[in-house]
């Protein structure tokens, strides 16, 4: 089944404890991106990657890191999480090197205490 | 300042009562405008891509149109299963880079029988 998977789906952690949220797609897509969704603010882009080894900042990249070493994987790294990073995170991918026709993952709900 | 503004924030329609959702944007260069549908607890689902003013796309009861600074999502004779949050996103053209994607805050549509 063609899909975008994220792990974990739910995570509660404490301030300063490094964490990684994984994202994987099995559709041979070029473009991948991370978003956070907060009540009243909507979806905001964190980072995106148009293909392997090429990444760029989105609208809200502060406090996050990404890497795209393989085409199928695009992990999101929080080196020192803070409470203001408590949010619902979505990973998405699309076939070409643009965000046209993105497929979204099921989301990861992160709580930082 | 929001790059993408959606209105209204919420809309309640009786089944069969047609209406339109608005998306206006202020980015200087448009690479593409996308419409998504999001159901509670799920990731957004792609609906349409529009690239240039005058373009129209249709799918079942939905029709998306684009002018120079705004887009409309027309819903004809809606059914209760059309209830969802509808998101608009704008892909920005910025120099020679791929550019960012900006989402509006969404319109929450409720269709009652």
Image (tube, coloured by chain):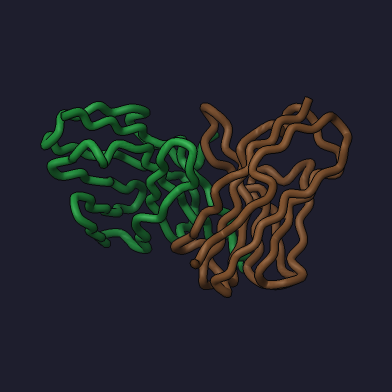
Chain colours: A brown, B green
Quadrant assignment, res A93: bottom right
Report x, y in % for residue A32. Answer: 61, 62
Report x, y in % for residue B53. Answer: 30, 59
Quick one: A22 or B34, which is closer to the camera? A22
Query: Residue at 58% of width from left, 69% of height from top?
Result: A26
Q: Is residue B5 left or right of residue A49?
A: left
Res. A55 visible in picture: yes
Quick one: B3 or B61, which is closer to the camera? B61
Query: Residue at 73% of width from left, 49% of height from top?
Result: A21
Report x, y in % for residue B106. Answer: 41, 36
Query: Residue at 59% of width from left, 71% of height from top?
Result: A30
Q: Is residue A20 left or right of residue B49?
A: right
Quadrant assignment, res A52: bottom right
Q: Is residue A105 left or right of residue A52?
A: left
Q: Is residue A105 above or below residue B86?
A: below
Report x, y in % for residue B90. Answer: 46, 52
Q: Is residue A41 above or below residue B58?
A: above
Farthest residue to the front: give it. A1
Quadrant assignment, res B1: top right
Res. B95 visible in picture: no
Tally of numbered discs = 0
Query: Residue at 50% of width from left, 67% of height from top?
Result: A2
- Looking at the rendering, in which quadrant would you find the C terminus of chain A? top right
């Amino acid at each position: 089944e063609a899909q975008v998977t994220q792990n974990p789906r739910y995570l509660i952690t404490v301030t300063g404890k490094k964490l990684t949220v994984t994202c994987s797609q099995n559709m041979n897509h070029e473009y991948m991106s991370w978003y956070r969704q907060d009540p009243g603010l909507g979806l905001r882009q964190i980072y995106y990657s148009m293909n392997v080894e090429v990444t760029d900042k989105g609208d809200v990249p502060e406090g996050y890191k990404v890497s795209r070493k393989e085409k199928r994987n695009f992990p999101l790294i929080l080196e020192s999480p803070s409470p203001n990073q408590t949010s619902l995170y979505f990973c998405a991918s699309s076939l070409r090197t643009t965000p046209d026709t993105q497929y979204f993952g099921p989301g990861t709900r992160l709580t930082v205490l | 300042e929001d790059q993408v503004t959606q209105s209204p924030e919420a809309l309640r329609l009786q089944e069969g009562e047609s209406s339109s959702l608005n998306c206006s944007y202020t980015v200087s260069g448009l690479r593409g405008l996308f419409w998504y549908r999001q159901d509670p607890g799920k990731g957004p689902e792609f609906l349409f891509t529009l690239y240039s003013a005058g373009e129209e796309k249709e799918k079942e009861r939905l029709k998306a149109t684009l002018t120079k600074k705004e887009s409309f999502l027309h819903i004809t004779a809606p059914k209760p299963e059309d209830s969802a949050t509808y998101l608009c996103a704008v892909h920005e053209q910025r120099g020679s880079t791929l550019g960012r994607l900006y989402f509006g805050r969404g319109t929450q549509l409720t269709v009652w029988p």
